[in-house]
Amino acid sequence: MTTRVNLCLLGCGAVARLHSRIARTLPGEVNLFFASRSPAKAESYRRRFAGRGAFGSYEEACTSSLVDAVLVCTPPAGHVAHARLAAAGGKTMLIEKPVARTLEELAAIESAVHEAGVVAMVAENYFFKPTVGVLRAHLDAGDIGDPLFLEINRASKARLAGWRTDPTEMGGGALLEGGVHWINYLCSLGGGVREVLAAQPSMTREGAPPFEDGLELLVKFESGAVGKLLHAWCVPNRLGGLQLSKLYGTLGSIVFESNGLFALVVGRRKRLRLPGILDLMGYRAMLQHFLRCVRERTAPAMSLAVARRDLAIVEATYRSLQSGRFERPAGAPELI
């Protein structure tokens, strides 16, 4: 019989609602608790999602013997403080992406986790998307030969509100807040990154936010392959978010819907793959993986180290926007 994990969500906003709905599909695996700076809000979420308890502060939740683990659902500006609280309370933690606004902030989280000897995972659901496993299987089987080019497209018109309109709270732009998903996706398919070159539209646009809201990123992978990512919050999408991305190899290609609805493989064999829509975005698989890590006290696959790799690429991208040159992510191997 599976032991239920007592999981407390720190922060009661839209992200907490999303994770709570996912958790409700795993009734035999998890009991929910909620914490907010507003006791009334925490209690409201407890009632709404049939939780077992509510706390009127994050400190109270992180020191409670009722709680096994916490899910940090607060904005990135609070992640260091809230990870420190969780670590001091000896709690296993799942931290929403982006895990931090800078590598310096991430180092502070890593230090707190290491000193407390607790387990920390990052809530990067794209790491667990079904389409990643399907595409990797075809690449590993050599169905399109040696990969040469990877092209990922994700553009939409975002409506910004709350802390996402504040440059200081954000700590970056669209690539840091939403695009880090796609950086992780890019690395899952292309492997390690050596260098990046970024460019963005330079004209003045009415209503543009005071930070980067779209760019093109050119990537040199350690394998020698080349990647390209278009990520934008400033482009209308009339197809309900549907967009195409592509993998090109020496023996064929794969055309896939960017979010993973389908993939058409044309190479050593031709196949139309439907990875699955029941957990299209990977949230359920991600939460199940985290709960296993809590129960079995094992290290997570989507670790702070993986998040460090992704955040280093984001920072290198922003440096490239300023320099106009290829930039090497922190920790990437030197070019030969």
Image: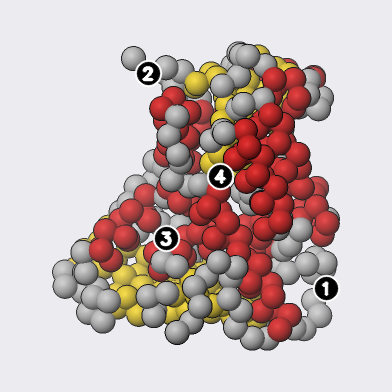
From this viewpoint, is residue 292 visible? yes
Given residues 163 and 148, the one toward you in this image is 148
Report how far apart the C-alphas of labels 4 and 1 lie in the structure.
35 Å
Q: Amino acid at mark 4?
A: Val
Number of marks = 4
Q: Amino acid at mark 2?
A: Thr
Q: Amino acid at mark 1?
A: Glu
Q: Which residue is mark 1?
A: 206
Report how far apart the C-alphas of labels 2 and 1 lie in the structure.
54 Å
Q: Which residue is mark 2?
A: 2
Decide if residue 113 is on the left or right side of residue 147.
right
Q: Which residue is mark 4?
A: 122
Label 1 Cα neighbours within 10 Å, binned few <14 / some 14-19 / many ≥20: few
Q: Position of residue 110 (x, y in %)?
A: 62, 46
Tell me whether the residue at label 3 lies in contact with that at label 4, contact meaning CB atoms closer than 8 angstroms.
no
- Upstream in sequence: badge 2 or badge 1: 2
